[in-house]
Amino acid sequence: MVRIVKAPEERREEIIHCACQLFLKKGYEKTTMQHVMGELQIAKGTIYHYFRSKEELLDAVIESIAERKYNELRTILDQSPGNGLERLFVLSTANQNAVHEENLLAELHKPVNAGMHTQLLARMITNQARLYGEVIEQGCKEGLFTTKYPRECAEFLLSAISFLTDFGIYNWSEEELTRRINAIPSLVEQQLGAPEGSFKFLLNLKYH
């Protein structure tokens, strides 16, 4: 068999991608480094050259997914003119458009992936709060919002909305979820000091 030599960064990304697929399919706890090695047909020394443990590999998988999503949103935001409120609308709706994320979420919502799901959600919130905080700050300078803490508001609101509307964490009934969703626009407006009704568009988003 001819030995295939790949560039270090290419090999590292290949390992991360393979591990992600295996973690989602088998669950993190049931996946071993040997599984990843077998799937890629690489030696033990190769995988441990890049990742000292399965925990370190999981962290790389989570960072890769979260960073990819951040970069997608960063690109969309940079291409979106408008005031702070208009750009918040863009950010809030952008998450609805990625088909590949539907499959990812379906796998993450399985009980076997609960730990990975929670870690990924937390990492994505931390990353995306930088973008939301930037736009909220823009809105404050424009007189649309009055909060003194743009970044903190972003972290608080993203955390609350993401966790409370996630069926992988809370097994809400439709009635319970609807009650919470209906309160979101008003709660966001109060936190940001925004005019009443300015965030009604949040009611049209898809929550999972």
Image (spheres, rainbow, N blue to C red):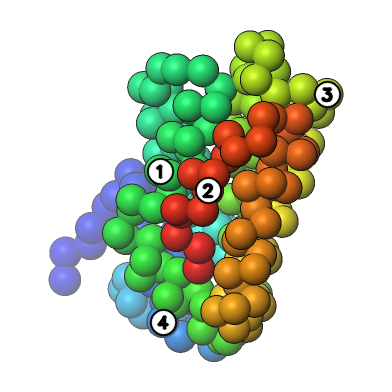
Q: Earlier in the sequence, mark 3 or mark 2?
A: 3
Q: Amino acid at mark 1?
A: Ala
Q: CA distance from mark 2 to mark 1?
A: 12 Å
Q: CA distance from mark 3 to mark 1?
A: 26 Å
Image: 185 above or below 148: below
Q: Is residue 55 visible?
A: no
Q: Please tell me in which quadrant of the rendered image residue 199 appears.
A: top right
**Closer mark to the observer between disc 2 and disc 1:** 2
Q: Which residue is mark 4?
A: 25
Q: Amino acid at mark 2?
A: Leu
Seen at 33% across and 77% down, the residue is 39
Label 1's element? helix
Seen at 48% across and 26% down, the residue is 86
Image: 193 above or below 157: above
| Left or right of residue 116: residue 41 | left
Q: Quadrant of the N terminus?
A: bottom left
Q: Which residue is mark 1?
A: 94
Q: Position of residue 36 (x, y in %)?
A: 42, 74
Q: Which residue is mark 3?
A: 148
| In front of the other: 13 or 73 | 73
Q: Earlier in the sequence, mark 4 or mark 1?
A: 4
**Closer mark to the observer between disc 3 and disc 2:** 2
Label 3's element? loop
Q: Which residue is mark 2?
A: 202
Q: Is residue 76 visible?
A: yes
**Closer mark to the observer between disc 4 and disc 2:** 2
| In front of the other: 48 or 159 | 159
Label 4's element? helix
Seen at 66% across and 65% down, the residue is 180
